[in-house]
Image: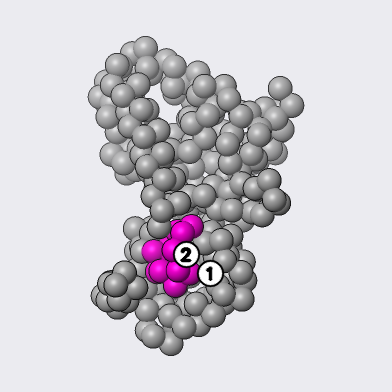
Amino acid sequence: MPGEVHVMRRMASRPASLAAATHCPPCEVRPQALFGALADATLSHVRLDIASVPLAADESLYLRGETGPAAYTVRSGLVRLERVTEAGHRRIVRLAGRGELIGQEALLERPFADEAVACMPTVLCRLPRSAIERVAQADPALPRALMLRWQAALEQAESWIADISTGPSRRRMLKLLERLLPHADDQGRVWLPRRQEIGDMLDITLETASRLVSQLSREGVLASVDGRRATVDVARLAQVLVAADR
């Protein structure tokens, strides 16, 4: 298929060293990832062919409508899933962080529903469909783990719509910060979207996004570190969220 060829060409353009397979059993992300439910013996005896895939900030992994032979686990960093509406507006529909599975459509040989873009330097594990099928034959725990991942992605998308895309713009911004907190780095810094990206996430104008960021900075909720990272005062955020919900 043309889309699958496009994905394969993009993967082939990466440095050859990225094709080296990783080893799942000792991986620090495994407990949070798809293979966390599997026994070490299963992973030791099944050929996985899992490759490490690095992405630069704002680099696309795959495009909406493409087809590909693999799904991906986020090992480090953060990925945003985007799509363009019929009206031509770009919308960010969810975020995927450490241990989360994306590109599940490939396992059913269906086109990707969204474009996957790295928010920051990100590393993923590429999970070929063929490897998933082999593991599923060896261990019945995998199909259930996959269903749980699909259910989690569905619930996240539904809650995103409820919390991020509806209601007053200030509350949407506060809920976005709350959702970014679990993806903070070791120093407590979260990815700070550009103002246009905030607008795309929250379905608000660029001007409104800029005003909200400035307002929350003055209130001590948010402090920019370098333009793309920020620290969030968790206690202050909780206070203003309670006020916003009244």
Visible in this render: residue 89? yes
Q: Residue 47 at what x, y percent from top left?
A: 43, 19
Residue pointed to by mark 1: 228
On residue 207, the disc is none
Coordinates of residue 219 in the picture (x, y in percent): 39, 85
Residue at point 43%, 87% (across, down): 218
Answer whether labels 1 and 2 touch (C-beta < 8 Å). yes
Q: Name the residue under label 2.
A: 191
- Toward the bottom, the furthest residue is 218
Specify the amino acid type for callout 2.
Answer: Trp
Q: Is residue 71 left or right of residue 200?
A: left
Instruction: Classify residue 31 as left or right of residue 164.
Output: left
Q: Where is residue 93 in the image (x, y as percent from the top left)?
A: 52, 49
Question: Magenta segment range?
Answer: 164-177
Near-viewer residue (68 or 151): 151
Badge 1 element: loop
Is any atom of residue 234 visible in this view? no
Quarter of the N terminus within the rendering: top right
The CA distance from mark 1 to mark 2 is 6 Å
